[in-house]
Image (tube, grey):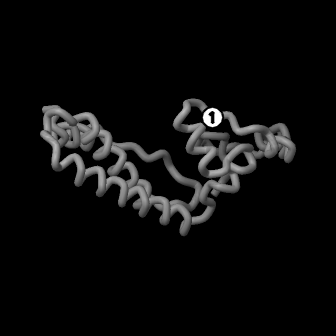
């Protein structure tokens, strides 16, 4: 595998690599206060004990087992949400149905791709999105 530019799949040639600036990590940034937006996000961060950037980085899953455990929790959440939505009239809650369907499909695609870096950005085709729209009651 060859080196590529940040956030790109374009390979870098040796002269470009040699000319690239060297950036050293700054450990003091880990102690900076974690900045989050919104009351719910602030509450969630406080509940998890996340007050610094370092706290957040330590909290994030770093290996495949952690990622699979988080994915399993997400699947449970989607299943519970689907059970709740199934008891409601279809037309009145089309948007939550669609959101759940789209995010569930993105999670499945992410799992199929795997959690080992480097990973590609996961997206759904227009055809798949159209099918989800119709199934959610937007058609």
Residue 43 placement, left or right of 107 = right
Q: Quadrant of residue 62?
A: bottom right
Total labels: the figure holds 1
Q: Residues within 10 Å of mark 1 (few under 14, many from 20)?
A: few
Which of 39 and 19 lies nearest the eye of the viewer? 39
Name the outermost residue toward the bottom. 65
Identity of the residue drawn at 38% across and 49% down: 106
Q: Quadrant of residue 127?
A: top left
Identity of the residue drawn at 43% across and 47% down: 122
Of the 4 image quadrants, the one containing the C terminus is: top left
Identity of the residue drawn at 70% across and 56% down: 58
Which of 53 and 122 lies nearest the eye of the viewer? 53
Which of 106 and 97 lies nearest the eye of the viewer? 97
x%, y% of residue 126?
A: 28, 37
Q: Quadrant of residue 34?
A: top right
User: Which type of secondary structure does the marked residue at label 1 adopt?
Assistant: loop
Of the 4 image quadrants, the one containing the N terminus is: bottom right
Which of 130 and 21 lies nearest the eye of the viewer? 130
Q: Tell me if I can see residue 24 in this picture.
A: no
x%, y% of residue 123?
A: 39, 43
Q: Mark 1 = which residue?
A: 36
x%, y% of residue 3?
A: 68, 50
Residue 19 placement, left or right of 49 = right
């Amino acid at each position: 595998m060859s080196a590529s530019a940040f956030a790109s799949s374009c390979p870098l040639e040796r002269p470009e690599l040699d000319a690239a600036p060297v950036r050293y990590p700054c450990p003091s940034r880990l102690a900076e206060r974690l900045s989050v937006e919104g009351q719910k996000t602030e509450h969630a961060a406080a509940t998890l004990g996340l007050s610094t950037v370092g706290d957040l980085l330590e909290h994030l899953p770093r290996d495949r087992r952690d990622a699979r455990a988080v994915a399993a929790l997400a699947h449970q959440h989607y299943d519970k949400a689907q059970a709740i939505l199934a008891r409601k009239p279809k037309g009145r809650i089309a948007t939550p149905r669609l959101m759940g369907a789209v995010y569930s499909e993105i999670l499945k695609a992410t799992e199929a791709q795997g959690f080992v870096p480097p990973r590609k950005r996961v997206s759904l085709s227009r055809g798949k999105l159209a099918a989800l729209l119709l199934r959610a009651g937007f058609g």
